[in-house]
Amino acid sequence: MSTVLERPVPSETTSPWWRSAVIYQVYPRSFADSDGDGVGDLPGITSRLPYLAELGVDAVWLSPIYRSPMADAGYDVADYRVVDPLFGSSQDADLLIAEAHRLGLRVVLDLVPNHTSDEHAWFRAALAAPVGSEERSRYLFRDGRGESGELPPNSWRSVFGGPAWTRVTEPDGTPGQWYLHLFDDKQPDLDWTHPEVRAEFEDILRFWLDRGVDGFRVDVAHGLVKADGLPDWDHEQELLDGSSHGGERPPMWDQDGVHDIYRSWRRVLDEYDGDRMLVAEAWVEPAERLARYVRPDEMHQAFNFAFLSAGWRAADLRASISDSLQASATVGAPATWVLSNHDVVRHTTRLALPPDAPRPNGIGAQDPQPDEQLGLRRGRAASLVMLALPGSAYLYQGEELGLPEHTTLPDETRQDPSWFRHDGTVAGRDGCRVPLPWHADRPGFGFGPTGASWLPQPSSFARYAADVQSGDPGSTLELYRRALRLRAELGLGTGELVSWDDADDADDAALGFRLCGSTGAELVVTTNFGAQPLVLPTGAQVLLSSAPLDDAGRLPADATAWLAG
Ligand code: GLC
Ligand code: MG
């Protein structure tokens, strides 16, 4: 089977950096600790920027660094213009941005507009002010139902479990109104119909753009506007779940009103030079609905969670890739690709699970333990598929080391609010947030100077430490380095997928596609999903492979090869 796709005419001769960028997500708590308190920080990140430049990425995205009580690891912001002292100072942020730029790396910050922390000055003022006050109108306060308002205003559920409403005690000590929080009760949702909310966030954008940041990842971008009247919606909610429940759009997600907000943000970014960008975290289905976030006058990119969620099967990946390319092409936006982030089980571990198993919210010691070697093989194979594709790719720190999820974290060390809000029945996201191993034989694997680490690291991290992988040609780190170098040399990010060349067999054992890089170079990508080794075309020149070929020159199971076209 070989389907030749129509080739789009490139609209621009030089393309802005973000159209093909590889963007590396740094989770600041867990990347590198400079002061030995066991929590990663900005000077730690800055000290490791040369490693990222050498890896070959184009940009770093930092999960939130702002002042926060850390009820949701910084996704609960108390002051959007100040760096949390745990991470350093504003000067440390300036130094980080300057050093990144010196090394040719862009810096993308995480903006959290759906909710603030309950310790934000606005929310404190709202609690102190009377019902119906201006202060309350920046959030979603409502009277309760029931005889004395003792029942929540509607049936919405929090994404982290439990009800999405919390009742407050009024300043006079009586039980009072309720406020909406789609996440933790320490993350009250803002009311985006309020003009001050809109003005404040445009100002925050300018504050950081003036400091030189190159863009923003927009947290929960599909949640800011709620349906009028907040109608009931009884379904359980889950992170990254964009399901529309039989075509009915949930009243808290993907409402048409969000787009006007992003049009106004785009105008702000366009006032600045240097191709500043916005990327949406929006769990929206289907791909055509997601494409609306990246229309020419809105955001530049949106994460592709359909690709992340695709099962380890040729047909699933093929469908996800081709749907994504088509949907983004209709609006002229680049496709994006992502396999791991700080909210999901790392793909090296996830891909060892049965392809039809629902995506788990964490894995605990009591759960069946995934096969680490199988996961690593598949994870490396999946990464080579992703890194060949046109558009932009997002990496999550540690995936370049092939790091597995920590699947046996002691319960008493867990910190994810979704673990607490599910009464410990759901492991949650801590397992993918464990501090990185830099040096195999230092305390805390060199995460910081003292060996302290806010979450315990598994002993297996010694095998994955960056220093033991660097220079070892069989390591995952070197695989990523070579893949990123080839991706840049062949112009794959700004290239095109020209045809599907899958082996025509009933078992759908192989995925195969041909790419044309913007340099004119051709590349064939082949993944073997079958149990048997795959015979490669005679004379094929293997540029890169996620696993060594066997003695007969065949591609083993669960491996991807890049062949010169
Ligand atoms: C996003 C973040 C996640 C956070 C949530 C609430 O989904 O990626 O980590 O908990 O928003 O801000
Ligand atoms: Mg520290």
Image: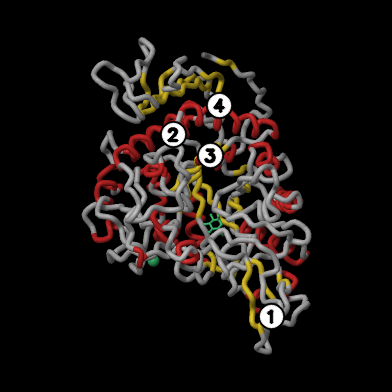
Position of 68 with respect to 561 (left or right) is right
Q: Label 4 to label 2, Cα distance in Å?
A: 25 Å
Q: Residues within 10 Å of mark 3 (few under 14, many from 20)?
A: many
Quadrant, the C terminus: top left
Circles 4 and 2, Cβ within 8 Å, touching? The answer is no
Mark 2 to mark 1 CA distance (whole Å): 50 Å
Q: Secondary structure at mark 3?
A: loop
Query: Residue shown at 37%/57% (left/top)?
Result: 434
Say which amino acid is labelled 3: Ala
Classify mark 2: helix, strand or loop.
loop
Q: Nearer the viewer, mark 4 or mark 1?
A: 1
Give the labeled residue for mark 1: 176
Of label 4 and label 2, which has the lower sequence position?
2
For ligand 1, the image quadrant comes to bottom right
Instruction: Evaluate if marks 4 and 1 touch, with contact meaning CB atoms under 8 Å apart.
Output: no
The spot of residue 159 in percent (x, y) is: 57, 58
Circle number at residue 18: none
Contact? badges 3 and 4 (CB < 8 Å): no
Find the residue positioned furthest to the top.
538
Q: How dense is the environment of label 1, judged by Cα within 10 Å: few (below 14), some, or many (20 and up)? A: many
Coordinates of residue 1 in the picture (x, y in percent)? 51, 14
Q: Which residue is mark 2?
A: 312
Front residue of this view, candidates 136 and 214? 136
Place of residue 381 in the rendered image (x, y in percent of width and height, measured from the top left): 39, 32
Q: Which residue is mark 3?
A: 21
Q: Name the element at disc 4.
A: loop
